Image (cartoon, rainbow, N blue to C red):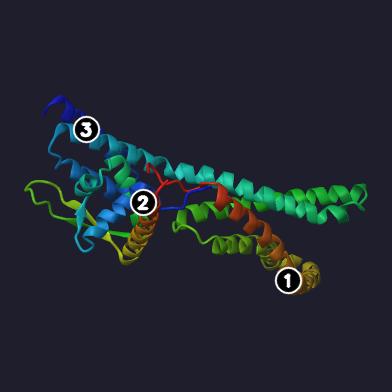
């Protein structure tokens, strides 16, 4: 069966990280560190989520002098809804898994 | 600057040059982060990942072109099978001249259907990025196929209006044809729409269920 879009673990990890600070603008490197995703995985996800309207971006001046401006990202309203829906599904699955794990064999 | 950092820099510059113009902001974003990476090892890994991303973006339009072709072919086959089944019973009673006429008509119909479907698929793949909405997309495809007769109508009207010499001869034939066409449009054409929509919708549901057309790149 074909997987549905935005359902991969990497996408969920990224959305979860962005949802931790929904109002903050986060940089690519910071997101890479927080999610453990390499740039080759992170940027395609950022591009796709941005294309789909789940992510907004802006340029901000770098804190280090002489360095180019940085691209910063945060979730849009629809992005937050999507991220929260994954969180709820994850919690339900975890609850079911712990229930089964707690049962005697 | 040591060898590793120099190599990373070269890779990063190459990645930026490979990125399509429409995505240049993303390449600049990657390069800005690259400039802030503390270690050479991280810089090299980062540049390698960015190069991969930029090449993926570069070949993406070609993928759209090929995937839309394959998708149009798949949907077209379902439609051809459906049309074939519908005319099979009637075609059984035809004789040689009529059969050849039917074959010619069908080849024109199938050729036009394929071209139209491919154009539809390419436009949807390029411009309609939101996932899902199978019903709406099928409605669009069906409507485009269904509206074909308009093309013929416009063509005949252009002949009529661009050649005044021919107007006397063409006018009665044209208006008679237009009257028939409008009558058919009101009475039979809604059925044609259903006949187009049903196989297209079935094939779309099958594709959505079993065929991964928009992969999550590198995810």
Q: Residue furthest front?
A: A104
Q: Dot 1, crowdedness within 10 Å: few (<14), some or many (≥20)?
A: some
The CA span between labels 1 and 3 is 64 Å
Marker count (numbered): 3
Give residue A82's position: percent from left, percent from top: 36, 61
Residue placed under numbered mark 1 in the picture: B185
Residue at point 70%, 62% (across, down): B152
* Chain letter for mark 3: B
The CA span between labels 2 and 1 is 66 Å
Residue at point 6%, 48% (across, down): A65
Residue contact at pointers 1 and 3, CB within 8 angstroms? no
In this orientation, which residue lies closer to the viewer: A37 or B171? A37
Give residue B2's position: percent from left, percent from top: 12, 26
Q: Check disc 3 and report its element: helix, strand or loop.
A: helix
Residue placed under numbered mark 3 in the picture: B44
Q: Dot 3, crowdedness within 10 Å: few (<14), some or many (≥20)?
A: many
**Residue A102: numbered disc:** 2
In this orientation, which residue lies closer to the viewer: B59 or B40? B40
Residue contact at pointers 3 and 2, CB within 8 angstroms? no
Give residue B32's position: percent from left, percent from top: 19, 45
Residue at point 78%, 67% (across, down): B170
Residue at point 58%, 44% (across, down): B70
């Amino acid at each position: 069966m074909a997987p549905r879009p935005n359902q991969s673990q990497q996408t969920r990890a990224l959305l979860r990280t962005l949802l931790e600070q929904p109002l903050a603008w986060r940089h690519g490197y910071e997101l890479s560190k927080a999610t453990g995703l390499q740039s080759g995985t992170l940027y395609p996800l950022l591009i796709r989520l941005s294309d789909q309207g789940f992510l907004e971006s802006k340029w901000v001046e770098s804190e280090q002098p002489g360095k180019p401006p940085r691209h910063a990202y945060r979730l849009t309203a629809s992005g937050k809804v999507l991220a929260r829906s994954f969180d709820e599904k994850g919690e339900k699955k975890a609850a079911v898994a712990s229930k089964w794990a707690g049962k005697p064999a | 600057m040591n060898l590793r950092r120099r190599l990373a820099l070269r890779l990063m510059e190459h990645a930026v040059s490979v990125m399509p113009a429409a995505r240049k902001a993303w390449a600049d974003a990657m390069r800005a982060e690259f400039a802030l990476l503390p270690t050479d090892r991280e810089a090299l890994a980062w540049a390698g990942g960015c190069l991969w991303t930029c090449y993926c973006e570069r070949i993406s339009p070609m993928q759209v072109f090929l995937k839309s072709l394959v998708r149009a072919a798949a949907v077209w086959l379902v439609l051809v099978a459906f049309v074939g089944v519908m005319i099979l019973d009637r075609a059984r009673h035809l004789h040689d001249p009529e059969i050849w006429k039917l074959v010619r008509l069908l080849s024109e119909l199938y050729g036009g259907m394929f071209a139209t479907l491919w154009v539809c698929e390419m436009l949807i793949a390029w411009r309609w990025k939101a996932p899902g909405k199978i019903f709406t997309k099928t409605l669009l495809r069906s409507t485009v196929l269904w509206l074909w007769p308009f093309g013929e109508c416009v063509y005949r009207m252009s002949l009529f209006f661009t050649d005044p010499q021919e107007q006397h001869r063409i006018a009665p034939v044209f208006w008679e044809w237009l009257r028939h066409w409008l009558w058919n449009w009101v009475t039979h054409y809604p059925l044609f729409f259903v006949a187009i929509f049903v196989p297209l919708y079935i094939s779309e549901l099958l594709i959505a269920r079993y065929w991964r057309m928009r992969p999550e790149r590198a995810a």
